[in-house]
Amino acid sequence: MQQIDEQKLETDSVYRFQYLADFMGFSSSDASAVQGAAMYLGPMIPEIVDRTYQKLLTYDATARHFVPRQTGFDGSPPANLSSITASHPQIQFRKEHLARYLSTLLGRTCDTKLVPYLDMVGKIHTPQAGNSEIDVPLVQMNALMGYLSDILLETLFQLPLDPPTMQSTLRAFSKLLWIQNDFITRHYSSSCNQ
């Protein structure tokens, strides 16, 4: 039986990643499967981003988080919830962030070098990083990750992959998104030490 330092899971993000990857069986072959899909998914990122933001702007509970000025955005934020549209410059700015996120998942090796990025993706949606006015509730982050996961899986099913490659690619993305989701939810835990 492996011994796991549970306190270290809360304080050492690399240790946490290694534990999750080992537990879920996320291996170097899974990382290769994710990167192998990049040539197909890369050109589809704009459509995935547009669909995601269309969904986010459909609900006031998710759209309201785009009213405060986003960290790094220099333009005028939306005046209120009713003035938010998909073409608003701040929404375009946020779309660029999601596109970069997806490109990063596809283009970087899914190993411990990716851990600080996965962790920051979770932290940036809370007052712990970025804009202290932005505090996206966990239920909204879970909704987003569930929706994004579904879009990615739907898109993957359309790729011209042979059945074994399709299966390994779908499993790899599923594991990676669960790891990402853990690096989001850890910042909502009252026991989080970071």
Image: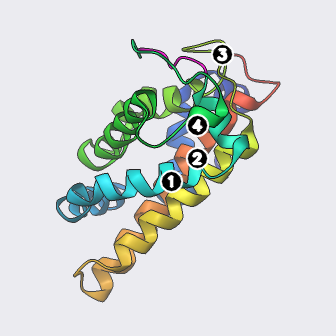
Q: Earlier in the sequence, mark 3 or mark 4?
A: 4
Q: Is residue 49 above or below residue 94?
A: below
Q: Earlier in the sequence, mark 3 or mark 1?
A: 1
Q: Are marks 2 and 1 in contact (CB under 8 Å)?
A: yes
The single residue placed furthest to the left in the displayed view is 39
Residue that badge 3 annotates = 194
Q: Quadrant of residue 191?
A: top right
Mark 3, secondary structure of its residue:
loop
Residue that badge 2 annotates = 57
Query: Residue at (66%, 33%) from the top-left corner?
Result: 81
Query: Residue at (55%, 35%) from the top-left corner?
Result: 84
**Residue type at numbered disc 3:** Gln
Estimate how packed mark 2 is, as few (under 14), some (14 to 19) or many (20 or more) residues with alpha carbons within 10 Å. some
Of the residues tagged 3 and 1, which is closer to the observer?
A: 1
**Residue type at numbered disc 1:** Gln
Estimate how packed mark 3 is, as few (under 14), some (14 to 19) or many (20 or more) residues with alpha carbons within 10 Å. few
Q: Earlier in the sequence, mark 1 or mark 4?
A: 1
> What range of the chain is rendered magenta?
68-72
Query: Residue at (45%, 58%) from the top-left corner?
Result: 51
